[in-house]
Image (cartoon, grey):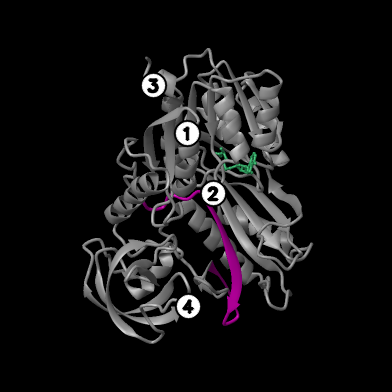
C-alpha cells in the first residue's frame, strides 16, 4: 500500500517556512513532508496552495503572507530585472549572509558529522552590488528592436535588462552599447526555435585592476553583417575596449560559446591582477567573476597553507592556475593538475607572464595524475583542492590519506560535498580545524568555503 501524503493537490494550508532550497524557494514541512514554495522565507507564516505532489516533496504557491521575515526586502516590480534573476534578491544582504553561514554549519554537522570544527562568520562584501566582471547575455527581438538580458526562470523568454545591479558598471555599459549598436545596424537576433538569425549572445569581460575591456560577439553565422561598422562604433563608444572578439556557434544548443573564435580588433587577451599576480584572460578562459572576493578567498587559502618557502605544494583542479600562482609566491614548488588542456595552456602562459619558474602543470584527472605521482614515490607537504560542485573523486581522497601531506586546504563551492569529503578525510586520519565561508556571489544561493585540514598526529601530538 502506498503511503498517503499529508497534503493533496489544490489544498489550501497554513505553513511556517523553515529553510530555503538551493533555488531560493521556501521549505515548509507538513508532518515531515517538504513543500517547496517560491518566495517563502524562513520564519514566515503563510497560506499556500498545493499545486503539485510528488513522492518525496510537493510544490506550493504562496497565497498570503501572515507574518513577514525581518529580512524580506520589497523590490518594486519594475526593478526586479536589475538583479538578473538572482535567487535571493528578496532577502536583505544581512539575511543572505546569515542564511549562507547557517547552511554551512548545518551541512557540516548533518552530512559531515563534524561537531567541533570552527566555522567562522562568513566574509561578505562591504558593497555587495556591481561585483561581476563578466556578463554573457542572450539576445532576442521585440517590437523591431534588439533586447538582451536574462532568461526568465524555467523559460527561454528574455527579460530586457537595461541596468544590472550585479555587473560592474563597465560590463553593463558595454553590453548596452553593443546591443544598441547592433540594433541600429539592423543585425538580426538569433531565434532559438527556428535556429535562424544571427546574434546569439553579447559577452563582456572587464579587468577591474587594469581597466581593460573585452567584447565578444557570438553569432550563429560565420559572417556578421556590417562587421567593420560594428567594430568602428564599438571602439568609438567604449574607450576602455582593448579586444573585440567574434565567436561562431552554429549549433542548436544551450552552450554559449561555439567552435570558432577570431579577433576582430585589438588584442587576443585582456589582463587583470589578483593581488600582485597578473593574469591573461582570453575569450574562452575561465576566470573568477568576483575579483574582490577572489582575493579574500585566495588570501585565506594562502593563510591556511601557511607556507615558509620550503614546501612542495600540489594544486588539484587548478583551472588556469590562479591558486597555483598565488601559492607559488610563497612555496618552493607548486604542481598544478587540471583536466582541461586549454586551461593548462593558460596556466603555463600565466606563470611565464609573472616570471615564475617554480611551477609545473599537468593535464589529466587529479585522481589519476596525483595517484600516479604518489605511486612513483613523489609526495607533497601541502595539498590544495578546489573541485567542481560534485566534490573530490574518492580515489583522490584515498591517495591523500595514503600520501599524508601535512596540510590540506579545501576550497569548495558546494558545502554538501565539502562535508562529505571532510568526513572521509577525518576517518582517514585528518582533522578539520577551521572552515571559512566566503560570499563570492551575493544575491545568489551560492556559497564558497575554504577549510584548513591537518594530519591528526600533528593536531594533537601524543
Ligand atoms: N582553482 C581554479 C578552478 C577551480 S574550478 C580557480 O580558482 O580558478 C574546478 C576545476 O576543476 C575546473 O577547471 C575543472 O575543469 C576542473 N576539473 C573537473 N574535474 C576534474 C578532475 N577530475 N581532475 C582535474 N580537474 C578537474
Q: Mark 2 points at which residue?
A: 389
Asked if residue 188 lies left or right of residue 56, the reply is right
The mark closer to the camera, 2 or 3, is 3
Identify the mark nearer the N-term, 3 or 1: 1
Q: Disc 4 versus disc 2: distance between alpha carbons?
A: 35 Å
Asked if residue 126 lies left or right of residue 350, the reply is left
Identify the mark nearer the N-term, 4 or 2: 4
Q: Name the residue under label 4.
A: 2
The mark closer to the camera, 3 or 1, is 1
Q: Mark 1 points at which residue?
A: 427
Q: Looking at the image, which residue is at 76% across and 64% down?
A: 250
**In the image, residue 286 lies at what x, y percent?**
61, 44
The question of residue 334 being in magenta is answered with no
Asked if residue 237 lies left or right of residue 13, the reply is right
Q: Mark 3 points at which residue?
A: 459
Disc 1 and disc 2 in contact, CB within 8 angstroms: no
Is any atom of residue 128 visible in this view? yes
Q: Nearer the viewer, residue 235 or 307?
A: 307
Amino acid at each position: 500500500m502506498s503511503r498517503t501524503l499529508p497534503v493533496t493537490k489544490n489544498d489550501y494550508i497554513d505553513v511556517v517556512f523553515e529553510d530555503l532550497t538551493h533555488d531560493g524557494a521556501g521549505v515548509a514541512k507538513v508532518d515531515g513532508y517538504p513543500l517547496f514554495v517560491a518566495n517563502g522565507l524562513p520564519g514566515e507564516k503563510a497560506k499556500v496552495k498545493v499545486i503539485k505532489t510528488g513522492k518525496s516533496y510537493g510544490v506550493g504557491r504562496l497565497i498570503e503572507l501572515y507574518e513577514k521575515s525581518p529580512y524580506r526586502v520589497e523590490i518594486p516590480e519594475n526593478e526586479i530585472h536589475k538583479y538578473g534573476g538572482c535567487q535571493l534578491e528578496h532577502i536583505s544582504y544581512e539575511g543572505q549572509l546569515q542564511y549562507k553561514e547557517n547552511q554551512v554549519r548545518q551541512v557540516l554537522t548533518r552530512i559531515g558529522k563534524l561537531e567541533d570544527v570552527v566555522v567562522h562568520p562568513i566574509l561578505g562584501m562591504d558593497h555587495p552590488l556591481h561585483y561581476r566582471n563578466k556578463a554573457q547575455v542572450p539576445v532576442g527581438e521585440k517590437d523591431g528592436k534588439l533586447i538582451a538580458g536574462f532568461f526568465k526562470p524555467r523559460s527561454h523568454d528574455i527579460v530586457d535588462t537595461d541596468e544590472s545591479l550585479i555587473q560592474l558598471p563597465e560590463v553593463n555599459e558595454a553590453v548596452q552599447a553593443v546591443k544598441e549598436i547592433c540594433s541600429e545596424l539592423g543585425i538580426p537576433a538569433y531565434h532559438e526555435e527556428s535556429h535562424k538569425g544571427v546574434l546569439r549572445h553579447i559577452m563582456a569581460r572587464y579587468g577591474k585592476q587594469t581597466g581593460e575591456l573585452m567584447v565578444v560577439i557570438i553569432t550563429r553565422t560565420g559572417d556578421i553583417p556590417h562587421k567593420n561598422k560594428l567594430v568602428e562604433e564599438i571602439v568609438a563608444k567604449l574607450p576602455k575596449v582593448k579586444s573585440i572578439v567574434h565567436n561562431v556557434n552554429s549549433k542548436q544548443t544551450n552552450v554559449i560559446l561555439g567552435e570558432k573564435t577570431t579577433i576582430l580588433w585589438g588584442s587576443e587577451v585582456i589582463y587583470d591582477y589578483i593581488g600582485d599576480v597578473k593574469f591573461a584572460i582570453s575569450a574562452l578562459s575561465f576566470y573568477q567573476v568576483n575579483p574582490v572576493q577572489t582575493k579574500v578567498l585566495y588570501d585565506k587559502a594562502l593563510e591556511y597553507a601557511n607556507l615558509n618557502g620550503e614546501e612542495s605544494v600540489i594544486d588539484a583542479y587548478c583551472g588556469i592556475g590562479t591558486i597555483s600562482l598565488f601559492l607559488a609566491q610563497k612555496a618552493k614548488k607548486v604542481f598544478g593538475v587540471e583536466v582541461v588542456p586549454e586551461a593548462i595552456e593558460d596556466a603555463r602562459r600565466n606563470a611565464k607572464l609573472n616570471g615564475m619558474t617554480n611551477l609545473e602543470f599537468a593535464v589529466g584527472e587529479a585522481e589519476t595524475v596525483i595517484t600516479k605521482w604518489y605511486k612513483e614515490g613523489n609526495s607533497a607537504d601541502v595539498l590544495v583542492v578546489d573541485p567542481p560542485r560534485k566534490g573530490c573523486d574518492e580515489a583522490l581522497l584515498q591517495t591523500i590519506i595514503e600520501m599524508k601531506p601535512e596540510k590540506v586546504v579545501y576550497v569548495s563551492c558546494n558545502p554538501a560535498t565539502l562535508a562529505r569529503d571532510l568526513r572521509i578525510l577525518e576517518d582517514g586520519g585528518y582533522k578539520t580545524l577551521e572552515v571559512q565561508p566566503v560570499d563570492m556571489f551575493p544575491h545568489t544561493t551560492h556559497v564558497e568555503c575554504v577549510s584548513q585540514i591537518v594530519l591528526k598526529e600533528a593536531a594533537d601530538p601524543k
